[in-house]
Image (cartoon, rainbow, N blue to C red):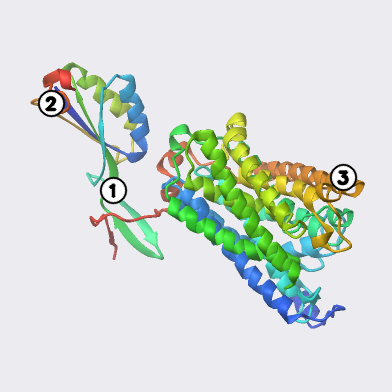
Amino acid sequence: MKKVEAIIRDEKLSAAKEALKTLGVAGMTVTEVKGHGIQKGITEVYRGRQYAVDLLPKIKVEVIVDDKDVKKVTDAICEVSRTGSIGDGKIFVSNIEDVIRIRTGETGEKAV
Amino acid sequence: MKKIGYLTILIFVFMLIKSSMVWAGDGVLDKGDNAWILASAALVLLMTPGLCLFYGGLCSVRNIVNMLMMCFMCISIVSVQWILFGYSLSFSDGNWFFGDLSKIGLMGITPDSLSGSISEYTFMIFQCMFAVITAALVLGAVEGRMKFSAVLLFVPLFATFVYDPICHWQWCETGWMYKWGVLDFAGGLVVHVCCGAGALTLAIMLGSRKRQNITPPCNLPMVCLGTGLLWFGWFGFNGGSALAADGRAAFAFAITNTAAATAAFVWIVCEWIGTGKPTFLGALTGAIAGLATITPASGFVGPLGAIQIGIMAGVGCYFAVTKLKPLFGFDDALDVVGVHAIGGTIGTFAAGLYCTKMVMGPDGVDGLFIGWGAEGLEQLGKQCVGILATWAFTVAVCIIIALIVKYTVGLRTTEAEEDKGLDITQHGEIAYHLELEATSTLRR
């Protein structure tokens, strides 16, 4: 099992959600996060004062998938989240040791 | 450009000459009347920032600043338009359809000029606030998809070619609806049908928002504050429309409160029956529906008539918002049509049913449900013609204005801008910075 952790633009969440649903991904965790990468942020102006917004709001989507599905899932997220401009986000893939469903105590792939 | 410059200078010269002449009216200024209408004008002004909060709280959190800004800028744009030529087009004699330009730049109006028993300046600024809020009300329909530049072009065109003529028809002594005897005390047709029909046209011309961009209201307490300010201001709106500090003003004041209170309750009853739960937003919307509906009738009907009109408002507007809108499928984001256009229509119609000589005096009319006579039936006919004329005229002219805006600055924002929200894309600012982490710092 792998964890796919995608940090995307917040306005792309609904599209990503739809794409994952059509791939049959069982569940997901969504977090509002703040951060920056290579992109250095934008400027907002209030009463003539400029504020450099250096930590931008993004959305983090975490899903747990079978090893064979990783490519499909990451491709789908890339496709819907890409605008071509700086700030489209990143995807991190990592290994998952085990999964436990709290209600029943099931472990492993059955619990995903 | 040079020509416009000369014209401006010429206008100022005329203003100087004219303002040295004293235009005495026949009456004398009544200090009590004048004071109350000035206070009412301030109350009606407060309704527009109140409307900002009411609409803002109903928006998606991505579009809230844009909504506040659009409504707020109406105060700025329409106030100046009103002084320059709006007042003249609405309230100078002209013909049955439109005023003339004899009062542009408030030419000829001095501190001594009278309008009835109040200063003409008092009358002018009181009426100005009505023009302001009518334009602002329209913009509830366009949440999240209208270019800000398009709004800035739409608002003065709407005020000039839609509001000013209808205002002239109904409230100027030479207007055809005034002369013919259509009853509209404080703006059921002039304000509410006008803004609602304009909103319907704009909503259809703009097209719908994407499904994903339609979110639940972002801030109900803010909607509550907005409703409170609107209700408060409405006492000036209806109570001031008697244009005197007399018993009829007090009557309209009390009637307004009664209808709003009734409609808020009736709305949640409808909701309870219809969907199983009474909601706070329902109560607030019901109150506004009641206020909009009683507006045309407030100086003509008795207290029990007001309760019946409140019930009609609650049921009728609830039905319009929850059933009619989905049926036709237009994306009137904040229900300007369901609440204001339908409310104004019901209220103007009901004024013909419940108007009474008890309130209107011996020159008045007993409505159909009061006198059960031919007089009442005739009045109801006049009300219907007034309603149809206002709807048809507003829709027709708004289509033309929307087309002009579409082919000059463009009406609608891009899909990418709508996804990101209009706050950041149109204004570069967002409504709330509540995060604890320092995400932004002052640039040197």
Quote the CA–CA distance across marks 2 and 1: 34 Å
Give residue A100's mark.
2
Q: Position of residue A57 (x, y in %)?
A: 29, 46
**SS of the residue under disc 2:** loop
Q: Quadrant of residue B94?
A: bottom right
Q: Amino acid at mark 1?
A: Leu
Chain letter belonging to callout 2: A
Q: Amino acid at mark 3?
A: Leu
Q: Quadrant of residue B321?
A: top right
Along the line of sight, the residue nearer the viewer: B126 or B420: B126
| Mark 1 Cα-neighbour bin, 10 Å: few <14, some 14–19, many ≥20 | some
Q: Are marks 2 and 3 on the same chain?
A: no
Which residue is under mark 1?
A: A56
Give residue B377's mark.
3
**SS of the residue under disc 3:** helix
Quote the CA–CA distance across marks 1 and 3: 64 Å
Left or right of residue B175, residue B295 in this image: left
